[in-house]
Image (cartoon, rainbow, N blue to C red):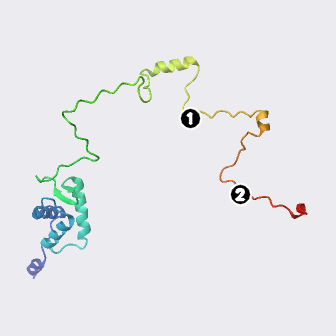
Amino acid sequence: MAAADEASKPPPLPPYPEMILAAIEALNDKNGSNKSAISKYIEGKYGDLPPAHASLLTAHLARMKESGELIFLKNNYFRADAPDAPPKRGRGRPPKPRDPNAPPPPPKPSSPRPRGRPPKSKDPISDAVAQAASGMPKSRGRPPKKAKTAPSPAAAAAGSAPVKRGRGRPPKVRPAVPSETAAA
């Protein structure tokens, strides 16, 4: 009775990476094999697949692509070690091809002053001594705000001094309504 149960069970499925590589080998397309062709081949050969076959196949293809086992180009998968696989390109725009007959570019004229922040001196001790001799200790962090000066009385009388306003949107100004007693 136990022998009959073992005979009726289908053989266990091989790991997905093996099935994927076998499908790509069997399809043997010079342009590579797309995901639907790989899926149809696996379904046809192994038959009884788990219900999550589509998501498992997608996850394994992505993992194999990241690990370098497969090359993905124009929506098709190739074996990385296949002789007809396209060469792997780097990211970004490829450099322009150089003409071997063209003369070399002229050297750029050097500017009188180098670009960027000037480098720190090599001897920090002599800098500290020079600063201490000047009487000013080196302060750290953000410099303090400048002290506000009071406006002169002539400028305040002219009304040119700006009015200090609070934060946020100012309240809406309502037009003055003429009173009825003033009109009468």
Q: How many marks?
A: 2
Cα separation, mark 2 vs mark 1, equals 38 Å
Nearer to me, 17 or 160: 160
Q: Earlier in the sequence, mark 2 or mark 1?
A: 1
- Is 54 in front, or is 7? 54
In which quarter of the view is residue 120 placed? top left
* Res 57 label: none
Classed neighbour count for the residue bearing mark 2: other residues with Cα under 10 Å, few (<14), some (14–19), many (≥20): few
> What amino acid is labelled 1 in the image?
Arg
**Which residue in the protein does label 2 denote?**
172
**Vertical position of residue 75 compared to residue 146: above or below:** below
Mark 1 is surrounded, within 10 Å at the Cα level, by few (under 14), some (14 to 19) or many (20 or more) other residues, namely: few
At mark 2, the secondary structure is loop
Left or right, residue 115 beside residue 167: left
Residue at coordinates 74% horizontally, 34% vertically from top-left?
151
- The quadrant of the image that shows the C terminus is bottom right
Q: Secondary structure at mark 1?
A: loop
Question: In this rendering, would 5 be left or right of 154?
Answer: left
Amino acid type for the residue under numbered disc 2: Lys
Is residue 113 depicted above or below 95 in this figure? Answer: above
Q: Which residue is mark 1?
A: 142
Report the residue at 20% width, 52% height from top: 68
Q: Quadrant of the N terminus?
A: bottom left
